[in-house]
């Protein structure tokens, strides 16, 4: 077991946006952030992204999983080779399917393979133990959000909003000493974020996203579709709660022209965030936004119009909004190696604070 010492960890994250592998170095003892190191991004090629998209919904053993896992391992190994001086690696893998009700989740890619290739200890399979104990298995970044709130010297509750393929919200009360203390954290997936907008752009335009939200800003929102989406039972369910990437929203907007469809999907994502605020203990002083969606001014404008908090990109605070999730898995890797919990009732609904992940040694 790792001793309490500052460790140079590399976090690897390939999210539901399917754009590529984020890699970030963090100096941490698993509790306190001591410094930020270099970062890198390895984009998925169009053919790789198409293969990952086609593999959504597959479970271990299903036909087609093995080549996709090999693709993921190769991409991660390539980006790992750019770093030196690393002591431990946190490898999230690529989520292909997530079924909280069935207590199962599938992150493709083997940490054992990466440990063998890199010669470094690799922490991976972060979600399974949480789900086996009744948790949702997601989101897992909140323990890092707690450390970030302490790093930022927040003196009042703040919330972190990650706008990836799916949106997730973390409420942090920095007056507590530990993230697993009751009341320190509340976290859950809000609803759709970038995924349906990106999928629509890929299908209709052959491009991965609506850059800068330019098309959505030209469109007219179909309020009936938005209202129908926000009337779904998920939004009334008490958190913690989590979602799979899959949604039928692209089908619901199929009859709309592209700007109107994107405006409607953007409004759904923003409305989901606002619905999430109804579950928070109180309105946080600031909503700190990370993930690719913060680059979409249309989405950010819609969120700011709906929530009672100041909406701020984490980049404005000197943090890297693109690399925050990769940093989170560097932080969690050190926690796993030290035997510290990585989730708790307030983040995933697990019965008690639990440490996830397994460690593969070279």
Image: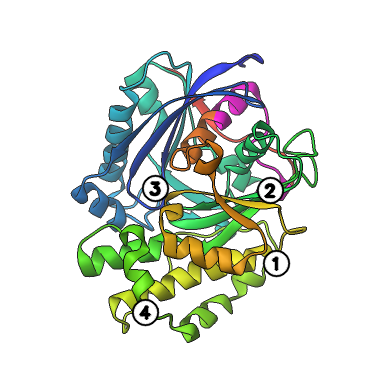
Q: Magenta part of the protein: which range?
A: 331-347
Quarter in which the C terminus is drawn: top left
N-term-proximal mark, 1 vs 4: 4
Tell me the number on the disc at residue 253.
4
As rendered, which of 85 and 129 lies closer to the eye?
A: 85
**Secondary structure type for disc 1:** loop
Q: Give the Cα distance between marks 1 and 4.
A: 26 Å
Q: Residue at x 36, y 70 (%)?
A: 216
The mark that comes first in sequence, 2 or 1, is 2
Q: Position of residue 101 (x, y in %)?
A: 58, 60
Q: Is residue 101 left or right of residue 47?
A: right
Disc sitting over residue 278 in the figure? 1
Viewer-side label of 3, 4: 4
Q: Position of residue 62 (x, y in %)?
A: 33, 52
Disc number at residue 116? none
Callout 2 environment at 10 Å: few (<14), some (14 to 19), or many (20+)? many
Q: CA separation, marks 2 and 1?
A: 15 Å
* 345 drawn magenta: yes
């Amino acid at each position: 077991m790792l001793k309490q010492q500052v460790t140079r960890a590399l976090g690897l994250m390939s999210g539901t946006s399917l754009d590529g592998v984020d890699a970030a170095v963090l100096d941490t003892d698993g509790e306190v952030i001591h410094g930020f190191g270099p970062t890198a991004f390895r984009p998925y090629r169009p053919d790789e992204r198409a293969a990952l998209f086609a593999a959504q919904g597959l479970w271990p053993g299903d036909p087609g999983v093995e080549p996709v896992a090999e693709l993921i391992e190769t991409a991660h190994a390539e980006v790992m080779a750019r770093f030196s001086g690393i002591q431990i690696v946190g490898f999230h893998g690529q989520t292909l399917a997530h079924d909280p009700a069935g207590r199962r989740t599938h992150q493709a890619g083997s940490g054992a393979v990466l440990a063998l290739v890199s010669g470094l200890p690799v922490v991976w399979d972060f979600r399974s133990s949480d789900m086996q104990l009744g948790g949702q298995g997601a989101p897992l970044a909140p323990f890092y959000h707690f450390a970030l709130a302490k790093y930022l010297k927040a003196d009042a509750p703040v919330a972190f909003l990650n706008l990836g393929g799916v949106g997730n919200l973390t409420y942090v009360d920095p007056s507590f000493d530990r993230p697993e203390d009751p009341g320190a954290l509340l976290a859950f997936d809000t609803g759709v974020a970038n995924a349906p907008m990106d999928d629509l752009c890929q299908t209709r335009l052959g491009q991965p996203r609506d850059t800068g939200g330019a098309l959505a800003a030209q469109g007219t929102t179909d309020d009936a579709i938005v209202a129908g989406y926000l009337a779904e039972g998920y939004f009334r369910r008490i958190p913690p709660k989590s979602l799979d990437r899959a949604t039928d929203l692209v089908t619901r907007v199929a009859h709309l022209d592209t700007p109107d469809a994107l405006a409607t999907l953007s409004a759904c994502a923003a409305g989901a965030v606002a619905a999430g605020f109804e579950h928070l203990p109180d309105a946080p002083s600031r909503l700190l936004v990370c993930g690719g969606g913060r680059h979409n001014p249309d989405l950010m404008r819609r969120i700011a119009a709906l929530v009672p908090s100041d909406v701020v990109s984490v980049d404005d605070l000197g943090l890297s909004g693109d690399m925050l999730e990769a940093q989170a898995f560097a932080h969690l890797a050190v926690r796993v190696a030290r035997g510290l919990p990585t989730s708790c009732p307030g983040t995933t609904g697990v019965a008690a604070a639990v440490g996830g992940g397994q460690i593969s040694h070279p």
